[in-house]
Image (cartoon, helix red, strand yellow):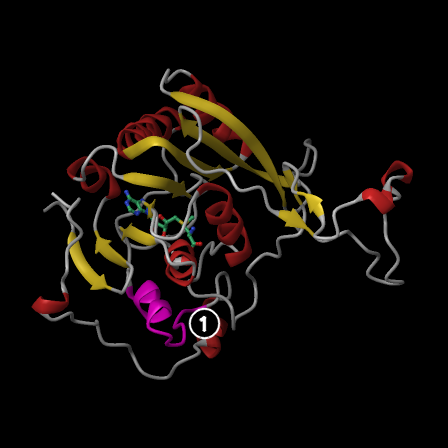
Amino acid sequence: MTADLVMNTECGQLYHGDCIPWMRSLEPGSVDLLFADPPFNLGKDYGKGINDKLKDDEYLRWTYEWLDAAVNLLSPGGAIWVYNIPRWNLMIGAYLMGKKELMFRHQVAVSMKMSLPIPGKLSPAHYSLLYFTKGKPRTFTRPRTPIEVCRHCGGEIHDYGGHRNKMNPAGVNLTDIWTDLSPVRHRKDKRRAANALPEKMLERVLTISSNPGDMVLDPFGGSGTTYAVAERMHRHWLGIELGDTEPIERRLTGREAVFEMPAKGDAGKKDRSAASTPRRRTVSADRLKQYPLIA
Ligand SMILES: C[S@@+](CC[C@H](N)C(=O)[O-])C[C@H]1O[C@@H](n2cnc3c(N)ncnc32)[C@H](O)[C@@H]1O
């Protein structure tokens, strides 16, 4: 085994280790939906042993390596979604386009709520979320979103070209621009110091590209957003994190997060939301019911 199993739940398994050899050890064609939110190589601190400031060509070499392993795991009709900044997703998209077994489905623009001005450049206002499938998608469920209303007066914002009365009461078809996802900034929602995605994004991706009982894999665990949502939506899941897996374990067992808020130095220590240092969860041998697909 290339990674250590640290947790087993009703629906999934969490490993500690490097996702590339781990993905290579799993059975090809066994994953229905793969969601990946890798480090963006922006110099973030993900903890000991994780370098988020590689040279461009090194980052791309590493990216193509994990993408190869990821695509190999997809079942026929399975989906891969990759979240990154547009700069890297341009390259990732081109790389995936070059794989003849893959079909481009969408590039979703996910709006950033707050972006800081960058001297000499436009202010970035979106992330990119790529969506490809291995051949024709096996599952595609198009969500509807509520008709947009003004947050001040409650009135509807669009007139839908005079066709409002013909609209589906369940809402409008989801488009490829997602402006309704709130960043995870608040301490009560935040499970890890850096970069937790909103659960709503994962709920959407899992709704579009999977069914209950399907196998979902996320090779970059972070705070475990994908796993928490998969668990709630009755999907099987496989996950791994190279850094500390404790925040994920705490989240999946309903315990409070323990972390220091980023960029606050010692002041951040006041933000610890649990007083004691958590113990690593141990799992008894008979609870380790391995999925047959694990090599
Ligand atoms: C952007 S975060 C993912 C956040 C996650 N989507 C969430 O909502 O919490 C990327 C994560 O990948 C982890 N990571 C980086 N390199 C890795 C590798 N080779 N294998 C597994 N995990 C890795 C980092 O430690 C970090 O926690």
> Which image quadrant for residue 80?
top left
> What amino acid is found at the position of numbered circle 1 in the picture?
Asp
Percent x, y for residue 138? 41, 34
Seen from the viewer's position, the closer of residues 133 and 257 is 133
Give the residue drawn at x 47%, y 54%: 195
Q: Is residue 172 magenta?
A: no
Give the residue drawn at x 21%, y 33%: 28
From the image, tell me which residue sits under label 1.
266
Seen from the viewer's position, the closer of residues 149 and 292 is 292
Q: Is residue 157 above or below residue 265?
A: above
Percent x, y for residue 163? 87, 39
Whether residue 70 is visible here, answered yes or no, is no
Highlighted magenta segment, given as a residue range: 246-260
Q: Is residue 33 left or right of residue 174?
A: left
Q: Is residue 249 magenta?
A: yes
**Most extreme residue toward the bottom, as rendered?**
275
Seen from the viewer's position, the closer of residues 245 and 153 is 153
Percent x, y for residue 115? 66, 47
> Which image quadrant for residue 22?
top left
Give the residue drawn at x 37%, y 84%: 275
Q: Is residue 157 left or right of residue 103?
A: right
Q: Is residue 235 left or right of residue 281?
A: right
Whether residue 149 is visible here, answered yes or no, is yes
Image quarter (top left, top right, bottom left or bottom right) of the C terminus: top left
Give the residue drawn at x 26%, y 51%: 242
Q: Is residue 258 above or below residue 159?
A: below
Q: Residues within 10 Å of mark 1 (few under 14, many from 20)?
A: few
Percent x, y for residue 93? 47, 24
> Which image quadrant for residue 119?
top right
Q: Is residue 208 above or below residue 276?
A: above
Q: Secondary structure at mark 1?
A: helix
Q: Is residue 230 left or right of residue 124?
A: left
